[in-house]
Image: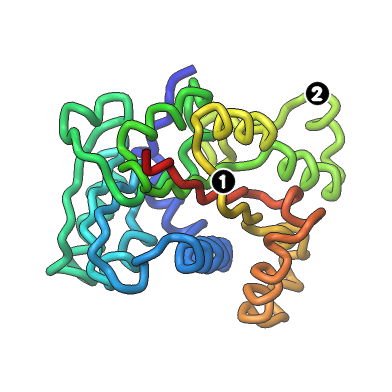
Amino acid sequence: MNDLNFDNLVRRFGKNIYHTAKGRIRLAVLWRDLLEYVPGIEQGGLSVLDVGAGQGHLALQLAEKGHQLTLTDISEKMLDAARDIFQTQQPDADVNFYHTPLQALSGFTDKQYDLVLCHAVMEWLAEPEKLITQLLDYIKPGGYLSLMFYSRTGLIYQNLVHGNFSHVFNNQLAGDGTTLTPTNPQDPGDVDKWLQQSGLDVLCKSGVRVFYDGIHRQRRKEISEEEIIELEMRFSRQQPYQSLARYIHVIAKRSAE
């Protein structure tokens, strides 16, 4: 299995994720966590590497604060979409765009950054167990990692509550690369182990979409999105809700030594 390139999914990604409540829930939780655990986010001036940046929606918020940004993606079309969005909304941003997989990023930059973002990437990789070690090379001593991954536990739970028992019995949980269902959803226990082995200190862990996907589609249209986001954020760090979330977001710090 190869790392998935999103060139053929660009339009669907933008429409189905960030133009919906799913994307707004994701951004709300990520931004809250960054504000609480990464010093300087509000003030600006940090060097930020966004690996697998996609269309750069979170990076836009960081650009508004005056951070120095480097966006990378294996998908040239995704990165082109990010360039267009930045040109329209943040034309004066301090930002570089590198069309490259993480494995080849050293050919573009040898810098280390105050903050490395890697959101919704791990679950599309052929060798996800190598990701955190690879990212560590780009985090300054005393710097931070913001990692979000698609949870296998959350996927199993959603299949159970929707009655998709055959998927669970037959272990048919992964996507085939033609949809936005990840090809390699991750066991949170494995990710915890890899973080511990890397020597990173986990500061924060939040669930993203702890209940939203379980709401009937018609009911979603009838209730306030503001209330949904408020409750998603309220329960995002509480068990057992956190463990049942569609995604898990972790903020971890590298030792200053």
* Residue type, numbered disc 2: Asn
- The residue that label 2 is drawn on is 170
255 vs 242, left or right, is left
Residue 40 in sight: yes
Task: Identify the residue at image location x=25%, y=33%.
Answer: 100
State whether residue 183 is above or below residue 222: above
Inspect this view and state whether residue 23 appears: no
Name the foreground residue: 19 vs 145. Answer: 145
> Which residue lies under the disc numbered 1?
202
x then y, percent, for residue 128: 51, 26
Q: The C terminus lies in which quarter of the figure?
A: top left
Under circle 2, the secondary element is: loop
- For disc 2, the neighbor class at 10 Å (few under 14, some 14 to 19, many from 20) is few
Residue drawn at (25%, 40%), measured in percent from left and top? 112
> Badge 1: few (under 14), some or many (20 or more) residues near its Cα, within 10 Å?
some
| Residue at the image point whose x is 62% and y is 52% from the top | 205
Residue type, label 1 = Val
Query: In percent of the image, x 14 and y 68: which residue is there?
Result: 91
